[in-house]
Amino acid sequence: MKIGIIGAGLSGLVAGRVLAAAGHDVIVFEKSRGYGGRMATRRIDRDGTFRIDHGTPYMTGTADAFQTFLGELEEQGLIARWADRISCYTDGQIIPELPGRDPQPMYVAPDGMNSIGKFLGRRLDIYFDEKVGGITHIGGSRIKKSPWMINSTSINVFEADAVIIATPAIQAYGLIATAQDEFDLRKMITVLDDISYSSTISLMAGYGERIPAEWKAILCDHPVISWICNEGSKRDFSGDMNLVVHTTDKFAKEMAETEDTARMESKILKELGNILGSWAARPEWHQSHFWRYHLPKKSLDMPFLESEDELAPIALVGDYFQGRSMEAAYLSGLQLGNHWMEKFS
C-alpha cells in the first residue's frame, strides 16, 4: 500500500517507520528543510560544529513503549541523561529546585534534537521543502485505484492509497477541509474544533567565554519569559555560554503581528537581564524563531483519529492525542502504525 504522510515530526516519522518496516511504500512530505518538527536544532557557527536546540529542549516520559524508545536512542548514542530536576524563578529569585515536582529523568541529544528525527527517517522517502496545500479524494479504492491525491503548493501531485496527517491540529483541520465534502471527513473536522495552541518565541543568545552557569534550566513564573535553558549543560561549546529562552504564550501572541523583530528581541533580552543579571541582556549575538503551534492547550482522549472508510483510509496523529508532549506524539504515531500494520497486512 502506498501511504502518504504529511509532516516529518515525531509522530509522522514513527508511524512511517513502523509501516515501512511492514513492507508498505511510505512517502513523507515536509514543508521545512529538515526532520523533527519541534525537535529543532540550529547551527550557530560557520563550520556547523556547534548546535542549539531552539524547539523541544528535552524528552521525558513514563509509558513503557516510550521508555523502550528512549532506551533504543540511548543505545545508539543519540541521547544522554541530562537532569532529574530543574530550577525555577519565582518572586524575583531563582530557586535550585522546582517545588512539588518529583524527580524525573530528562534526556537530551548531544548532537541536537533533530538528530532523533534523522535517525527515524533514515529509511523513509522524504520530500523536504514540499508544502502540501490540500488533499483530494478522487474516488476508487486502495484495491483497484489510489483513492487520494496529495496536492503540493509547488504544483506537484502524488497519488496515495492512504494518508496520514501528522501536523498540528489546526493545520490538519485545514487540509481535511480541502478534501471532498464527505461525511466521514466532516466528522473528523468536528472533533478537531476544540484544539487550540499556545505560541512561543524562542530566542537564542550567545555570550562568548563565560563562567558556566550552575543551573541547567529554569522554569519561570514571569509575564514575558517562561523557560531558560543553558545549552552548555547539554554539549561542549569550548567554554562559550549559549542560552535559549522561550516566551510566554501571551507575549508571543502580542508580538506575532509585529514587524519590528529588533524591538521584540530587545524586550526579551531586557527581561532576561532582570532575571539572570544585567550581563544576560547583552549577548554577543542573538536570533529568534516564532513557534505558532508550540503546545496544544488540550488533548483528545484517543491515541489517533481515523476515518471509517477502509477503502480510502485517512488518519491523524500528533501530540494532541492523549497528552501534550513528545511522549504523546511518539505514542500516537506508534499506535496508528501498529494498528494499520495489522489492519492492512
Image: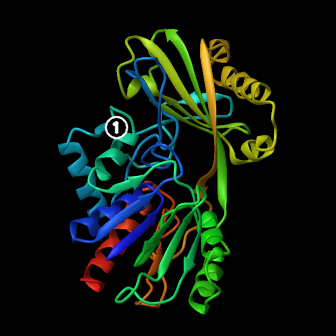
Q: Residue at x 29, y 83 (%)?
A: 344
78 versus 180 height, above or below: above
Q: Position of residue 73 (x, y in %)?
A: 25, 47
Instruction: Determine whether 265 is above or below 190 in the image.
Output: above
Side (left or right) of 65 relative to 211? left
Kind of residue at disc 1 = Ala
Q: Is residue 265 above or below residue 238?
A: below
Quarter of the image holding residue 16? bottom left
Q: Is residue 100 left or right of residue 83?
A: right
Q: Secondary structure at mark 1?
A: loop
Q: Quadrant of the N terminus?
A: bottom left
Foreground residue among 121 and 228 = 121
- The number of callouts visible is 1
Q: How is the image coloured?
A: rainbow
Q: Position of residue 207 (x, y in %)?
A: 55, 13
Q: Position of residue 320 (x, y in %)?
A: 53, 66
**Quadrant where the image shows the C terminus:** bottom left
Residue 296: x and y in percent read: 59, 60
Relative horizontal placement of residue 208, taking residue 199 as reference (left or right) = left
Relative depth, front residue between 108 and 6: 6
Residue 14 visible to an observer of this rendering: yes
Badge 1: residue crowd in 10 Å (few <14, some 14–19, many ≥20): many
In the displayed orientation, state which residue is furthest to the left. 75
Residue assigned mark 1? 109
